[in-house]
Amino acid sequence: MALLEVEYCKPDLRLLEENGLMAVDMHFHTNCSDSFTDVNKLMELAQARRAGVAITDHNLIGSVQSIQGNEYSVPVIPGMEVSASDGPHILVYFYEYKDLEVFWAREIRPRLNHCPWLALKDCPTEKLLDLLEGECCVVSAAHPMGYMMSNKGVEVCISKGYLGPEVAKRLDAYEVVCSGMTRRSNELAREAAVRYGIGFTGGTDGHLLTEVGNVVTVSDETDVDGFLDSVKDRKVDIYGIEKSASKKMQMGSASSAKFVRHAPSTVHVQAEQALMSIKRGIHKRASTGFMGTAEPPA
């Protein structure tokens, strides 16, 4: 397959299948975390559209677990989106569900907050990457530029000096098309991935059923193992477009409704992360010798 890198267009999933290509939406949420989408309905529509899907609920694997043993006409990749305690969201894709289950039970479940899909306890990005060393998985930074001025992306934390660029180089990929982001944010993520010499992934960050397959990662491999290998080997194409403003608002409203059920925990965790950002800013200014409003020394 000729490497096209990124095409900002709605993917023609039928045509991709007819050409022998595997197309997977690599970032999708269900009602296991902050979406109302039922996993069985998700799989029905994914099959109808001919889109593979990676189920990546925040810190949880209940939906992936519930469909184990089912046969589908499209590939299903077991994964999760881990919410690191220092802000970034990390997509982790496992070759085998049983390996995901063991890793989750050992490392993620003990660190869950009362609202389980919020930032984990005592698991900053670099510690998470340490825990993933030696695991049979592929690791990609979700929406690397963050969103809504948050630190929920690796690249935005690097740009602020909270993380070093060596963190990005430990990843297999950056998510270079996330349909919840702006075009400019996606372009910056792509430029950063090229700069670090890492691979690309693309997904909708879907929370609404109808989103599945609107952004896909495409490979000429024929099974999940080969597909994930092709991500590591930087032999994939990304097809997709960003959501409209109205769709983003609709998705945000649906997601927010789930957080209302965990309001005290949500407020507590968000306050902790805000305080962390303030402390980082103070430390950064102190380390550069610039604490006032005047120009820093030359």
Image: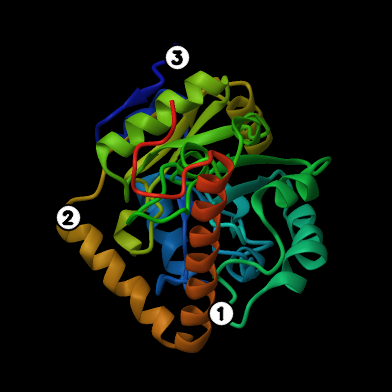
- 2 vs 3, front mark: 2
For the point 48% across and 39% down, the residue is 155
Position of 110 compared to 244: left or right?
right
Residue 235, placed above or below residue 260: above
Position of 150 compared to 286: left or right?
left
Residue 26 picture location, percent across and down = 49, 45
For the point 47% across and 66% down, the residue is 274
Q: Which mark is residue 24?
A: none
For the point 40% across and 74% down, the residue is 36
Secondary structure beneath dot 1 equals: loop
For the point 24% across and 49% down, the residue is 243
Q: Is residue 55 visible?
A: no
The image quadrant where one finds the C terminus is top left
Q: Report the Cα–Cα distance between label 1 and label 3.
A: 41 Å
Q: Report the Cα–Cα distance between label 2 and label 3.
A: 30 Å
Residue under label 3: 3
Residue 288, placed above or below residue 4: below
Quick one: label 3, few (<14), some, or many (20+) residues within 10 Å?
Answer: few
Residue under label 1: 115
Quick one: label 1, few (<14), some, or many (20+) residues within 10 Å?
Answer: some
Quick one: label 2, few (<14), some, or many (20+) residues within 10 Å?
Answer: few
Q: Answer with mark 1 or mark 3, whichever residue precedes in sequence.
A: 3
Q: Answer with mark 2 or mark 1, whichever residue precedes in sequence.
A: 1
Residue nearer the viewer, 141 or 277: 277
Residue nearer the viewer, 290 or 95: 290
The image quadrant of residue 59 is bottom right
Q: Amino acid at mark 3?
A: Leu
